Amino acid sequence: MKAYLILEDGQIFEGEHFGADKEIISEFVFNTSMTGYVEILTDPSYAGQSVVMTYPLIGNYGVCLEDQESHVPYVEGFVVNELARLGNNFRKNIDLEDYLKEHDIPGIQGIDTRYLTKIIRQKGCMNGMITTHQYDDLSVILKKIKDFRVTGVVEKTTCQKPYTIGQGRKVALYDFGAKKNIANELVKRGCAVTVYPASTPASTILEGHYEGVMLSNGPGDPEECQNIIHELKILSKSGLPIFAICLGHQLMALAHGFETEKMIYGHHGANHPVKDLTTQRVYISTQNHNYVVKTIDESIAKPWFVNVNDQTIEGLEYINENIKTVQFHPEACAGPLDTGYLFDAFIKMMGGKINA
């Protein structure tokens, strides 16, 4: 069956439909990872977005449910150059197309995804539609596409009630759309992790007598989360060790009066170099964000990591506070494990060390 990808600027890509028979409108971003499509599909940070994979063949090892980063995929649509109809791997539970059908996610293949990526790089992330209907008059459709906004996605992806996994040091994990491997990495290091919904008041965390707090990744515009920012202002003054990842990093910056901004096309992939300004060492990181911390007050926080490619802020150390934050994903999944040591740094923070 033919399928069409219609961009908000009027460009149309014709390809072949796969996955669910469904029409969707979303924001479109590209991901440069060569593997890890299961983790990408199930990363809650993609809520409200469709993903264009730059690697030409996707689906060749099927879907291993153990690799999911959440219990369901959150992408709106999936765009690939070529779909492998039959995955071949001893860990496979289901083929990719059947998995997408099961979760009501449409896809399109047979288009030049690298050309599409160039368009997004030049014009920025843009809205679009995946459909199997050939529209003669695009005027009404283009208005609907242009009017689409990614909103309310933290509420969509957060857990509904608290739960605890692991044993050991008591750690509270704010779930803004958390990938499961964040909690898993803490459990590996001897932590009892209680995962809380994004709307949890700071008072609940403080009354729980936790040794540390982790702020998770998540989707959408951080400035939309004003209630969460208010609670983080309270939490940041408590003296508790706090470590934040991705959206959590942005929200903590906003709680300190810093500014964030939307990037042209964001960082999405498993090959982004970041430099630790303390050691001058470069690490390869997994990233998935459309927003970035734009400005900071260096009397309150100092840059910790920067992106080697575009010099954007990738991490902050808060001065005279036991708070560290990173924009990238030390929990990886998918991607390199280079920065997994940052979870060890968080364990050390819970020993009471304050940033200079």
Image (tube, grey):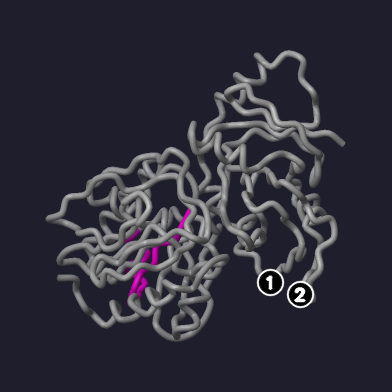
Q: Is 283 drawn above or below residue 167 in the view shown?
A: above
Based on the picture, tell me whether residue 199 belongs to the magenta stretch.
Answer: no
Q: Is 201 drawn above or below residue 190 in the view shown?
A: above
Residue 51: horizontal and vertical position, in percent? 62, 46
Residue ID at (28%, 77%): 349
Of residues 136 and 186, the one drawn nearer to the viewer in this rendering? 136
* Residue ID for mark 1: 66
**Lower sequence index among marks 1 and 2:** 1
In the displayed structure image, the side of residue 351 where residue 339 appears, left or right? right
Q: Secondary structure at mark 1?
A: helix
* Residue ID for mark 2: 91
Residue 255: horizontal and vertical position, in percent? 27, 50
- The quarter of the picture where residue 117 lies is top right
Q: Are marks 1 and 2 in contact (CB under 8 Å)?
A: yes
Range shown magenta: 202-218
Q: Secondary structure at mark 2?
A: loop
